[in-house]
Image: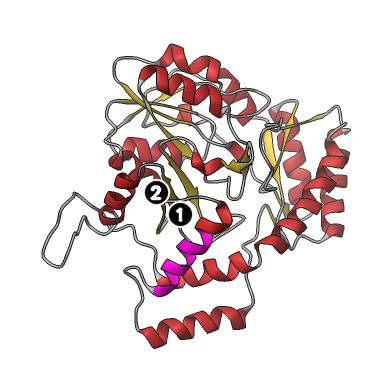
Amino acid sequence: MIFVTKPYLPDEEKFNHYVSQIFRSERLTNNGELLLELERRLASYLGVENILLVSNGTLALSVAYKLLGLQGEVITTPFSFVATTSSLVWEDLKPVFTDIDEETLNINPDEIERNITDSTTAIVPVHVFGNGCDINEVEAIAKEYNLKVVYDAAHAFGVRYKNQSILNFGDISILSFHATKLFHTIEGGALIIKDRDLYVKARKMIDFGIDGPDRVRYLGINAKMNEFQAAMGLCVLDDIEKINEKREKLFRAYEAAFQFDPLVKLQKQNLNCSNNFSYFPIILEDEQSLLLVREQLSLKGIIPRRYFHPSLDRLDYVESRFMPVSNSVSSRILCLPLYDSLDINDQRRIIQTVKEALVK
């Protein structure tokens, strides 16, 4: 079977070396040596300051909202993984959906301003599939209306925007280090926090709000990353350039196969952004075409993913008006298998199967 993604597993001996270090230190969590080393190395690699590692990307979002004191309404996109919305609802915030740009798949900045009310406290855009949203427009609107900005950059590991890390924008950016991501720590995530004082506070918030042996200073939660997660992260980070090179070759092969195909539409890339080759989505003419392609791939043991489906304005636990562009794209988009160890011959079979299905 060929799935849409496959976790990268580093050299087992190297990972076991780190595990032996954990056993010798007898420290499994609570800011151990490996976690602190990973934070330092990631800050350097990504070109960021104030990076805080946590146990998963969803908690990173929840901590960000709590840290900024968000209340009331938050403008966000309906085209994302469910955690972008569910984390808002979990924190008793009201998602106010703004439709997406049909070509970039990111939140449409032209639609944001009309959704701002006296109850709006923040904007939560998503860099969809690692493709940077229109940061200049988002931040200009946020500044005008005195709103916070939290970027869901779960897919944007290593992406650069105008020659600097895309994570350096907004009040907070978050990353996901889930096992299926370009860079992973089995499970995990991170916050990149612009304000240093908030960063210091966040370090305590993710450890129950504890500020010393006998003092709890803030309302907190347990969101810490453990040493085994950090060990995996250090191993994967060692190999990240090799991973990127392989993924880029596969991405470019897909791109060459489909960019001029009249039956397939590709995501429009932000020209101010680099590409981390995390995903390869194709957008088909209609849902019937998508279902046919998926069926033909499945018959050959190839499992793509309807990513993202359904559009989040369809969730039962949100109050929302219908988002026509997001729903249209959601019904027609399919992510093809893309991971560093995907065999080139298997990729050719995927491409051939898609093309044959579309001309039937």
Where is residue 355 shown, x and y percent of the image? 86, 39
State the residue in front, 307 or 227.
227
Q: Which residue is mark 2?
A: 60
Task: Assign the magenta stretch its main secondary structure.
Answer: helix
Q: Residue at x 87, y 31 (%)?
A: 261
Quadrant position of the N terminus in the picture: bottom right
Q: Mark 1 belongs to which amino acid?
A: Gly
Where is residue 189 shown, x and y percent of the image? 45, 54
Q: How far is disc 1 from disc 2 in space, using C-alphas?
A: 6 Å
Q: Going by the image, does 266 lie left or right of 132? A: right
Q: Are marks 1 and 2 in contact (CB under 8 Å)?
A: yes
Residue 189's disc number:
1
Query: Hey, which quadrant is residue 273 in on the image?
Result: top right
Q: Mark 2 belongs to which amino acid?
A: Ala
Q: Residue at x 52, y 20 (%)?
A: 323
Where is residue 218 shown, x and y percent of the image? 18, 50
- Element type at mark 1: strand
Is residue 66 shown in magenta?
no
| Residue count near mark 2 (Cα–Cα under 10 Å), binned few <14, some 14–19, many ≥20 | many
Quadrant position of the C terminus in the picture: top right
Q: Going by the image, does 57 lie left or right of 359? A: left
Is 1 drawn above or below residue 277 in the view shown?
below
Magenta stretch in the rendered image: 33-42
Where is residue 2 shown, x and y percent of the image? 72, 58
